[in-house]
Every structure is written in C-alpha cells, then in structure tokens.
Amino acid sequence: MPTMSRRLPTALLLCALHAIAWSATPPPPAPALPAAAVASTPSAPQRPRIGLVLSGGGARGISHVGVLKVLEEKHIPIDVIAGTSMGAIVGGLYATGMKADQIEEAFKKINWTSLFSTRVGREELSQRRKEQDFELSTALELGWRDGEFRAPQGAVSSRGLDALLRRYTLPAQDISDFNRLPIPFRAVATDMETGQPVILAQGDLATALRSSMSVPGVFPATEVNGRILGDGGLVDNVPVDVARAMGADIVIVVNIGTPLAGRETLNSAIGLTAQMINILTEQNVRRSLDSLGPRDILIQPELGTLTSGDFDKVAQLVDIGEAGAQARADRLAALSTSNTQYADWQLATQAHNLPPTQLHFVAFSGTTATNPSRLQPQLESKAGDAFDPAKAERDARYLAASGDYVQADYRLVQDSRGDGLLFTLEDKPWGPTYLNAGLDLSTDFSGNSAFNVKLALNRHWLTPSGTEWRAAAQIGEVPRLYTELYHPLNWNIGLSDDWFVSGWTDGERRKLSVFNSNGGDKVGELRRSQLRIGLDLGQPWGHLGEVRIGPVYEATSSDPLLASSTDALASTQETWQEMGLRGRIVVDQLDYANFPQRGYRFETDALVGTRHERGDSNDLAWVESQVTGAASWGRQTVTLHGEVKAANTASASTVGRYSLGGFQQLSGYQPGQVSGNALVFGRLNWYMRLAETPVFARGFFVGTSVEAGNAWLNYRDIRLTGLRYGGSVFLGADTGLGPMYLGLTWAPRGEAGLALVIGRP
C-alpha cells in the first residue's frame, strides 16, 4: 500500500492524468462526430483497417508503450489512433512516427518529479529571483488582482510537461491536420462549460495532447478555439467510438484504468476521494467496453497496485504492458502482416525531419501584463539565425523563470516576413502582485527559542522597462521591515545589457544574549536596533550571478535588557553609525536553495568607509565571504560550507559583529554564545533523500553535520588551532514554508541537546 507521503500527490495526479469525473451523473451521449474528424487516409484493401485505442490512467499509461512493442514485434500495422489523457500522449507520439523503443527511452530519461514540480528549475532563475528564493519559498504564492486575493489555478504545474510535449512533437510542427500525421490521430478532451466531448483532429499537436489531460484545479486548463478544455477522461476515457468514426474495422483497446480499492483504503479523505474518482470513471469506461465486437481485441495489463503517480517505474510498467499484450497473442496473430507489407507500412509512417529553418523574426503573444520585448536581448534565439530547438526550449524556460507566466511555449510560424519563432506567454491570473509567506522557528527545548512570521509582497512591471517593488515584513522575535525599488537600465556595457539601479531600506530589532567571555556563561541580554539604507548600481551575469556596488548608511543602537551585577559591559548602552562604499559579488549555481543536490554558491561583500561612535570617527573596513558546494550520487548528497568574516571594528563592543551558535551554526552552543569581529566557520553535511513529492514538499531527508569554527575580537587573533567543534544528526524536509529540521546536537565544549528549526539554519 502506498505511504501517506505518496498518497496525496498521487491523488492529485489521479485527478490530472487518470480519467476522472466530477459528478455521478453520466455524461450526455457524445454527439455525432463531424466529417472533419474522420480520417481519410486509405487502407490497403487486402486487410482490415486497424484502430488503436489507448485509455487514460496517469503513470499506468506508460504500459501502453509495452503494448506497442508487442504490436511491432508481431508486425501489426496501426491505421488510426485515438487516445485520452496519458493514452493521448503515448498515442500522439506514436502517430508522429516515433517507435515504441524511442518512446520508452524518452520516458526513462525524464525526471518525472521535476516534470510536475510547481517550481521552476532554480538554475533557470535570474539572480534576483534566486535571492528571493533564499528568503522565502514561492511554493505558497498568492496574488492580489482586481481587489481580491487569488490563488494559482493548479496544484501541479504543467510547465515541464508543456516543454516535453513540444520537444517530442517538433517533427510534426508543420502539420495542423491530424489526418496528415504519419498515423491519423485523435485526442479526446472535455468542454468544461458544456460537459461535451471535444475530438481534437487539427491544430497544434502539443496543445492537443496537453488539453486531453488538463484538469482545472490540478493542471491549468487550456483554451483552444474559445473553448476551455479539460481531461478527456471526464466523458470518454476509452474512446472506442472515436476510432470507429475514423474508419477502423477492428479496434485494439488498451484499458489501464485503476481498479477499485479495498476497504482498508477507505479510512481517509484521500482514500475516499480516489475511490470516488475510480467509481465515476468506470461508468464511461464500461459503456465503451460494452460496445466492443467479436473481432475487437481488449488488452488489460495486470498493473496490480501500481498507481497513477508511479512515474519512476517506467521499466516495470513497460514490461507489464508487454506481458498484457502477449497474453492476447493468439488474437493478435490474426492481424499480423507479411514482412513486405509491414516494411511498406513502416516506410509510410516514419517520422519526417523538420527542414532547416532560418528565423526572420522572434515575436511574443498572449501577455497583457508584461513587456517581454525587454527580455528579448537575453534570449539565445535571434532573428537571422537558424532555428535551434534546444535554444528555443532554453529561452522558453528563461521566460518562465521570470515568475510572471503560467505558461511559456514556442512555435514556428509564418507571416509576410517569412518563418519566425513565436513565444506564447500566458500571464499568471493571480499576478503581477505576488504575496509569499513563511515561518522562522527555532528552539532547543531548553529556553532558547524564537518564532517569526515572514511576509513578502512583490509588484512586478510597474513600468514597461520592468521596474519592481519588493516589501518584506517579519513579525515575532525579530521584527524586520525591508523594502526595495529595482529598476532595469538596459545599458549595453560589459557582460550584460541589463544593468539596474536599486534603492533599498532595511530595519530590524533583535534581542542578543551577552556572555562573559567568548563561549562563556550568559551574563545579560540587550536589544539591538539597526537601520540600513543603500543605493546600488548592479549588473546581472545571466543565470550565473550578479555584481553590485553603492553607498550604504547604517545606524545601530544597543540597549541593555538584563544584566548581572558583576558585568559592566552587559549594562552598557551603545550607539554608532557606519557609512561607506559597499561592493557585492555573488555567483549562485545551486540547484535548490535548501538541501541542494548539486552546484555551488559563492558570495563576497566588502565595505570601505567610516564609523562614528561617541563623537569619534574611525576608518572602517570589513569583508564577508562564504561558499557552498554540493555533489550527489544516487539519493545521497554531500555539501561543504565555509565562511570567513573580518572587520576592523573596535574590540570594546559588548557583542561582536559576527556570532556563532545554534543548530548547524556550531551545534551544541547557544545562539550568539561565540562572537567577535572576525569569524571562521566550516560545515560538512551528508544527507540522504528518503522521499520526494512534486507538490507540497520537495523531499524528506535524513542526515548529519560536522562543524568547526570560532570567533575572535580582533582579526589579527585568528588561529585555526583554536577552533571549536560541533555536530548534529537530523531529519529534514524542504516544504512550502521553508526547510524544516528536527535534530540532535552535540559539542565537545558545549552540550548535547535537541533542536527544532523551521527556516534556514
């Protein structure tokens, strides 16, 4: 039986990829199919016209590929194909001329979890979006539009699926009449306004395949010729009638629907919902199967407990499909043709290659809230170049990574200028004002705890040039307000033609513990308030990173809250101001902000200026650098993180500029227990992915950390021989609220304990 962590996404994918129904009322009878829906390709008179019918069923539909392999092995030519949902995808690819082994290899190469992920691949994000991803996850994104809050249309993103279908249907890019495909083809969808079946016989093939498995609320619905289309399984999960209307004399039907579950699964809302879906689906499936005649062949692979979400079991599913077809070998043998006949059929149905195409223009359509022409200089596809599908796909991902579109697709088109590349962009219905929320919680269950609620508002496209406003608030133990106005300049200088200027303000107040020596006992507490104002001139380096430079002003005050009678420093009030010129370089190639599996991130901040304190002015300089690298093999990952920070700040301050302590920041020590004006820290992490889901949590992990570091009042006192050590063992999850950890901590010179953390350690 599937685990709870898999049932939820599986239930969602059942809705999207399996044939479903939303009410117990049987759908109305299908209307007579128009003449245009009937295939016209003639068949050899000496044999019957064979139709292939492939049903929906999510990942279970991968077994269709195994059936195709047997049909090829037995030299059975297919004259027409009708499919629904996943059956439409497999059937549509076969109709373009792809062979069964090619489809199988393509499916094996797909990372199905990322395919349905709601998150854009982090490597595709601009550095601005990557920095926001570090702060708050976009998994729980809401929008404000037309005076109301709006939520995303689907729980599972179709972005990866759209790109996949576009890639594999490129050979049929110039075919709009599905009768002209190597094998005539139909996909079945549902008109979500009328509840009537829609037989897709022409248009864009990739869009037709997506429409056939498009369920509003899970996948975003598609709009084709003014109709809102949903999953065809709602009304015709096994489209035998469609194949007959295409002229099939005999139909080979592959039904891979999910059987009804047992009583033991009906003790939860998820189990009951899945059972309801299966019951309602069987109503239209049964009507189709009852229409089969004595010459028709029904294949029902024995899929057992495999679910609609088992996309990671491609090889097993294909094998089961083969076994199911071989079980009907006696019936299939009657449809076999001679080697010569089959070779002729193969020649007639082979995929044709898209001829080389020179692009005369690159254009955009569909968006009303954005100005994609501003992003055009960053695209790899250029007018005057030959069309390159790989470049077009990367460009579509780049546009999607802007965070403004629910869909970013591409097509080759023609107009008076000649051949061109058209990017179709669909604005997020809940944008361009976005809201994100998260939590920041930490406790060692010994009195040291903090809880903060994080909120962020992002307003995109304030101007046609792409001006953005971002505001963030933190409520709780550490109140914080942040705001930034970001404006692209479009300067064509250096490595980028997308320079920017950014004005920002950041204010926070936090409570700090005071210890009687570096790593000693707690002697007091103080409240430190900081206000920073900056103006940056910056240059993005594509997906690689960015550089910034600009003036910064900072005002700080510290007020005692609690102090022992023996410690004068803990009762000292302090105020100072700092100003100077700050530079920042960041290179970020991590695949995930939390629990990365590959890549690296490097950042360095430095400032040269002055510090004003108690009427005195002193030269100020500081530099802060950190680097993170990640590498994986299988489900296991090792990360290495290092930090070096140093400032020439006067050593008489109550609490140093930098501190260590807390979970994975020198585990076994209290937060801030080790502090100074210079710091060296390193951490080695190992973790293993236990499970991953495409919806609410990216994955669940178990791991351990080994940490070493220390802080000194003066950077001249740095000694690697004086390092302190700590470590942890933890369970973790990367969720829409941020990373979560439950761990055991220990330090030779600290103490053992238990830690619960939500947010970045």
Image (cartoon, rainbow, N blue to C red):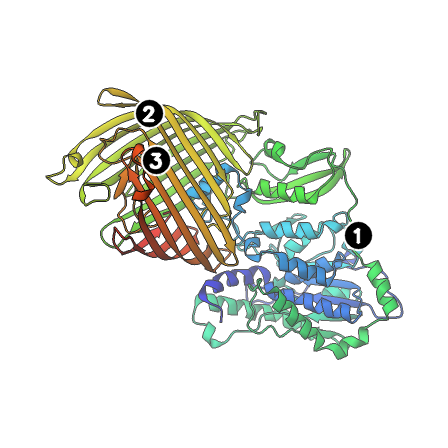
Q: CA distance from mark 1 to mark 3?
A: 59 Å
Measured in 3D between alpha carbons, the distance from the residue under mark 3 to the one under mark 2, in whole angstroms, is: 26 Å
Q: Is residue 255 above or below residue 687?
A: below
Q: Quick one: label 3, few (<14), some, or many (20+) residues within 10 Å? A: some
Above or below 177: residue 534: above
Q: How many marks?
A: 3
Element at label 1: loop
Q: Nearer the viewer, residue 95 or 69?
A: 69
Residue located beneath label 1 in the image: 352
State left or right for residue 586 relative to residue 567. Answer: right
- Residue under numbered circle 2: 620
Of badges 1 and 3, the one in the foreground is: 1
Q: Residue 106, located in which quarter of the rendered image?
A: bottom right
| Residue picked out by circle 3 | 481
Circle 2 crowding by C-alpha within 10 Å: few under 14, some 14–19, many from 20? some
Three-letter amino acid code at the position of disc 2: Leu
In terms of secondary structure, where does tag 2 sit?
A: strand
Q: Taking the image as drawn, is residue 416 in sight?
A: yes
Q: Earlier in the sequence, mark 3 or mark 2?
A: 3
Q: Residue furthest left?
A: 565
Which one is earlier in the sequence, the residue at label 1 or at label 2?
Answer: 1
| Apparent side of residue 18 relative to residue 622 in the rendered image (left or right) | right
Q: Secondary structure at mark 3?
A: strand
Q: CA distance from mark 1 to mark 2?
A: 68 Å
Question: Measuring 50% from the left and 33% from the top, which residue is drawn there?
Answer: 546
Query: Contact, CB < 8 Å: mark 3 with mark 2?
Result: no
What residue lies at 15% left-to-right and 39% top-to-bottom?
A: 563
Query: Who is closer to the viewer here, 123 or 417?
Result: 123
Residue extending farthest to the front is 721
Identify the residue shown where x is 40% and y is 43%. 642
Q: How far from the left and from the top, in percent, is residue 134? A: 43, 43
Is 321 left or right of 1, judged from the image as shown? right
